[in-house]
């Protein structure tokens, strides 16, 4: 899941509507003033937004993945829970931030919002083997209750080749449909079944 401002498993998203005070000629970029919290919107992004969309269609969702031991991770879990998702299988990893993508939205003549800038906070390195094994164990346990498996890969380190292969092989053996939204990578072999 992700927040928009919920890693690969989790990312958070935040939208800001800054006011452009001036366009300093010396640097050629607008100077923005961060707005107060009333103009911020925080919502699940990435895999978490897919989970929320599936919930909106009336299905049950059991999220498996990671979040950081931070405010963004707690907020992501809170929002997913409020939407109706089971977040009991989201692992909290100290020292690894929840992916946050903060978008700065400007207004053209105070009418049309347009993204001016996005600031990302993330760690997309592959997870340690011990954490990958924990995820595979959770997949094995939760697969018994699942009707389908949905892999949302945003290339944030969660869905390594090993985790993908294990998830796909386990779902295949259990006769569960497998849906894959692949990362933008050159080699899709880790998704083959």
Image (cartoon, rainbow, N blue to C red):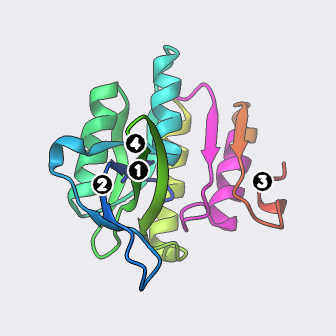
Label 4 sits on residue:
44
User: Where does the magenta region start and end?
Assistant: 146-171
- Residue 15 showing in the rendered view: yes
Q: Of helix, strand and loop, which one carries label 2?
A: loop
- The answer to if 148 sits in the magenta stretch is yes
Label 2 sits on residue:
18
Q: Earlier in the sequence, mark 2 or mark 4?
A: 2
Q: Residue at x 53, y 36 (%)?
A: 50
Q: Nearer the viewer, mark 4 or mark 3?
A: 4
Q: Residue at x 60, y 57 (%)?
A: 154
- Asked whether the beta carbons under mark 2 and mark 3 sit within 8 Å of each other, the answer is no
- The answer to if 40 sits in the magenta stretch is no
Q: Residues within 10 Å of mark 2 (few under 14, many from 20)?
A: some
Q: CA distance from mark 1 to mark 3?
A: 39 Å
Q: Of helix, strand and loop, which one carries label 3?
A: helix
Q: CA distance from mark 4 to mark 1?
A: 21 Å
- Asked whether the beta carbons under mark 2 and mark 1 sit within 8 Å of each other, the answer is yes
* Farthest-out residue, bottom: 26
* 132 vs 51: above or below: below
Q: Residue at x 29, y 33 (%)?
A: 81
Label 3 sits on residue:
191
* 119 vs 103: above or below: below
Q: Of helix, strand and loop, which one carries label 1?
A: strand
Residue 28 location in percent, x, y? 47, 78
Q: Residues within 10 Å of mark 1 (few under 14, many from 20)?
A: many
Label 1 sits on residue:
106
């Amino acid at each position: 899941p992700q927040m928009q401002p919920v890693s690969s498993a989790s990312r958070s998203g935040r939208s800001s509507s800054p006011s452009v005070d001036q366009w300093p000629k010396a640097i050629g970029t607008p100077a923005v003033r961060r707005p107060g919290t009333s103009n911020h919107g925080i919502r699940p992004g990435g895999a978490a937004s897919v989970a929320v969309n599936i919930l909106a269609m009336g299905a049950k969702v059991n999220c498996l993945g990671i979040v950081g031991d931070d405010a963004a991770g707690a907020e992501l879990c809170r929002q997913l829970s409020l939407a109706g998702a089971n977040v009991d299988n989201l692992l909290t990893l100290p020292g690894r931030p929840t992916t946050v993508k903060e978008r700065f939205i400007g207004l053209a003549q105070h009418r049309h919002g347009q993204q001016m800038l996005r600031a990302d906070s993330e760690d997309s390195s592959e997870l340690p083997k011990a954490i990958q094994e924990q995820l595979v164990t959770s997949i094995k346990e939760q697969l018994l209750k699942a009707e389908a498996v949905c892999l949302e890969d945003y290339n944030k380190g969660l869905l390594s080749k090993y985790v993908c292969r294990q998830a796909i092989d386990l779902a295949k053996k259990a006769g569960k449909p497998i849906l894959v939204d692949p990362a933008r990578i050159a080699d899709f072999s880790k998704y083959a079944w």
